[in-house]
Image (tube, grey):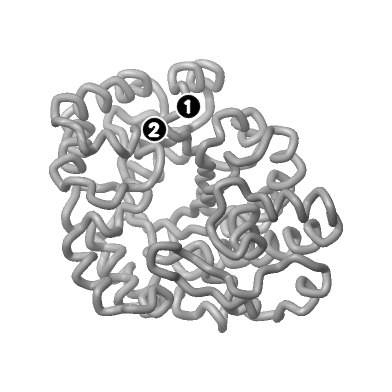
Amino acid sequence: MKDSLFLRNCAGEVTSEKPVWMMRQAGRYLPEYREMRARFPNFLDFVADAEASAEATVQPIRRFNLDAAILFSDILVTLPPLGLDLSFVSGRGPVVSNPIRTMQEVRSLTTFDSEKALSYTRSAIEKTKQLLPSGTPLLGFVGGPLTIASYAIEGQSSKNLLNTKKLFHSDPSTYKAFLELMATITGKYLALQADWGCDALVIMDSWAGHLSAEDYREMALPYTKTVMEIAKHAGRPIIHYANGASHLLKDVLTLNASAFGVDWRADLPSVLADNPKTVFQGNLDPALLFAPPSEIKRQTTEILNLVKDRAHIMNLGHGVLQGTPIEGVNTFIETIRNY
């Protein structure tokens, strides 16, 4: 792994060629993924099947010239062992039928051992490492504590996190107790993924952008720091990504991460100029992969021109979108390789 382009950039080394991987690179835009997904009516069964998870992880590595694989799993796998009734409903996404709203509900959650309850993740990592080409790093990941907790509090995806914010403002002690619990569980699970064989780790705080800077500093930042403090002991690089969070970047950068993902709404020239020693990841708009090849090349080259003299990880500003054309992905990657 010492020659890995991805890990070298995580460590701050400036390389003439930039590494590339994509968030949600294993997913529905790939026909081989759709074929396999059809075998699992229940998405959680898919995630818990170590062989299927490993296969989904390596599919984009076989198809594209990528510098890292990310384990195929889900950010919400720690909720069912807690006693939360999680299901994935077509057209709605994740649904928790017994959401957390009171201190009594927090106290009634089940204590569990991640090594036992999530042992299928260990099996998936071990199987994936056997399938990956030598020298290709495997990334483990978790959701940010705010993001994971918000699903449990809201009971489903939310565009405004109303119930989460309501709990924080009306019953701060319950909110704090639940977020502290989620931060500890999440940190330990992330560290375990490193112990089980992952070469780098990712924290994805998908809903952080719904918060103001003031709320972020109280509702999310302390708990993400806890995750990092626990996981740092594993000795692996950690990438932090927050979606829609350009207005939070000053606070996000106080986290002790190796690299920071920025989405396509961030003004990359300004971000780079203001933080000359920081390693960033991103930030091509994933919708651009639907564009003509000339436009994909132009905008990808613009990013490459900006980062040519610094460590940087090429990626999209968010996950690969459903229906993304394979040709668009190829153009993005080939532009980087041929730069």
Three-letter amino acid code at disc 2? Asn
Residue ID for mark 2: 283
Mark 1–mark 2 CB contact (< 8 Å): yes
Query: Which secondary structure, mark 1?
Result: loop
Q: Residues within 10 Å of mark 1 (few under 14, many from 20)?
A: some
Q: Residues within 10 Å of mark 2 (few under 14, many from 20)?
A: many
Asked whether 170 or 320 is in front, the reply is 170
Quarter holding residue 81: bottom right
Three-letter amino acid code at disc 1? Ala
Q: Identify which residue is drawn at 56% across, 83% down.
A: 116
Gap between marks 1 and 2 measured at Cα: 8 Å
Q: Can I make out residue 169 in this image?
A: yes
Total marks shown come to 2
Q: Identify which residue is drawn at 46% across, 53% down.
A: 200
Q: Identify which residue is drawn at 58% across, 70% down.
A: 96
Q: Position of residue 103 (x, y in %)?
A: 83, 69
Query: Which secondary structure, mark 2?
Result: loop
Which quarter of the rendering shows the C terminus?
Answer: top left
Residue ID for mark 1: 266
Q: Which disc is residue 248 wearing?
A: none
Labels 1 and 2: the sequence-earlier one:
1
Quarter holding residue 126: bottom left
Please, is residue 273 above or below residue 7 in the view?
Answer: above
